[in-house]
Amino acid sequence: MNPFKIFIVEDDEWYAEILAYHLSLNPDYVVETFHSANDFLNNLHRRPSLITLDYSLPDMSGNDLLKKVKAQYPEIPIVIISGQEDISTAVKLLKEGAYDYIVKDDDAKERIWNTVMHARENLNLKDEITYLKEEIGKKYEFSNIIKGNSPAIKQIFALMEKAAKTNITVSVSGETGTGKELVAKAIHYNSPRAKKSFVAVNVAAIPKELIESELFGHEKGAFTGAAARRIGKFEEAQGGTIFLDEIGEMDLNMQSKLLRVLQEREVTRVGSNAVTKIDVRLIVATHKDLAEEVRKKNFREDLYYRLLGLPIKVPPLRQRGNDIILLAKFFVDDFARENKLGKISLSAEAQKKLIKYPFPGNVRELRAIMELSTVMANDGVVEEDHINFNSATTMSDIMMEETTLKEYTSRIIKHFLQKYDNNVLLVAEKLDIGKSTIYRMLKDEEL
């Protein structure tokens, strides 16, 4: 820990030495004294941790000196020490940014000791908060939050980097389980708003009669059950980012209210006429095709264009190639470390089995599968039979995305191979195709 450096600015040399001796009783404090404003200012670049400042210096008033220090280093706490008990002067100096105002009397030394101790505790707390926020930022670096080297993921990284540099609204789309909220968090924690709040709201999880209150807040008595005033999620995210997940589930009436908030940059709590200006960055996400929802009249066209901003489509896991193996190994290592299971690896056969599976539940499903397989592993190796696919994959899941006939055929055969435990003969019989077709597709790694 760096020493806590205190500068004492006091023209009374005897009092300065007494004060320095008293504070130096704490071995963590490094104390220096200065007997004039000019001498002190010439050393200010050394950035003390705290300053005690005599209000009546011969070459500059305490008020002027306080302003000079605060202009250069606003974070340094300054304790004013004065021979006069003047309430109006004390109030003025505290408004100007002084940490405390202490009168030179019999109790002054103890009061200064306690004030310095409290100031140091506050500075340590601020340092800790800053450190934790920096660690959060590191945690959400793009390559830390989204694992993968596939071209699709590299393209996502490029878009996220562009999004993080501006305040443009971002619309994240993709199938359930692909990690849309992680993308939103990564953008926030790599943006200038990183030190402010990230507030996530799952629109689909909130009853439609409560969503206005949830987003915009309400006043006491605004409706039955509103026992106290409550600020909404938009106010909670002030200066930061609000993430509206599953925005496609919002009803049309609420869509019009959201549109007004985005246009006016202000909210009105339910039961109030007062408006509150907001400064938030908006990121939305959906697994639906919003353009199609607009065509179906389920989503407002004007809101759609307001939300579109910078679109980021997160690819499904089945389109990410060897990222499946990279993620699988990461989940195995992470689970094994958390549960103190030692080093666990994936066999070649297990990796082949993973690559062939379509993962309708995407990354979320892969994590669950790998955690279970890690528990089932013997002798530190996850084998093919340790990997069990118990997804509720349906033919509608397989057909939910427009693609080529060849890709549909591949997905259907994969589905039935998983369903019938890779029994090629049985699958050929069920689908009424030649077994040689399946063997050829397996050989050519089309399955």
Image: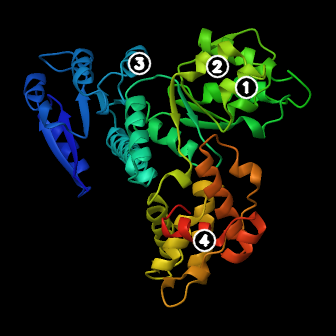
Most extreme residue toward the bottom is 379
The residue that mark 1 highlights is 293
Quadrant occupied by the N terminus:
bottom left
Residue 85: where, in percent of width, then height?
38, 22
Judging depth in this view, the residue of 258 and 12 nearest the camera is 258
Placement of 273 over or under 233, stated as above or below: above
Q: Dot 4: what SS?
A: helix
The residue that mark 3 highlights is 95
Q: Residue at x 73, y 20 (%)?
A: 295
Judging depth in this view, the residue of 88 and 205 nearest the camera is 205
Residue 118 is at least partly visible in this image: no
Q: CA distance from mark 1 to mark 4?
A: 43 Å
Q: CA distance from mark 2 to mark 4?
A: 49 Å
Q: Dot 2: what SS?
A: helix
Q: CA distance from mark 3 to mark 4?
A: 84 Å
Q: Dot 1: what SS?
A: helix
Q: Of the two numbered discs 2 and 1 on the same chain, state the one appearing first in sequence.
A: 1
Q: Dot 3: what SS?
A: helix
Amino acid at pointer 3? Lys
The numbered dot on residue 436 is 4
Residue 66: where, in percent of width, then height?
26, 21
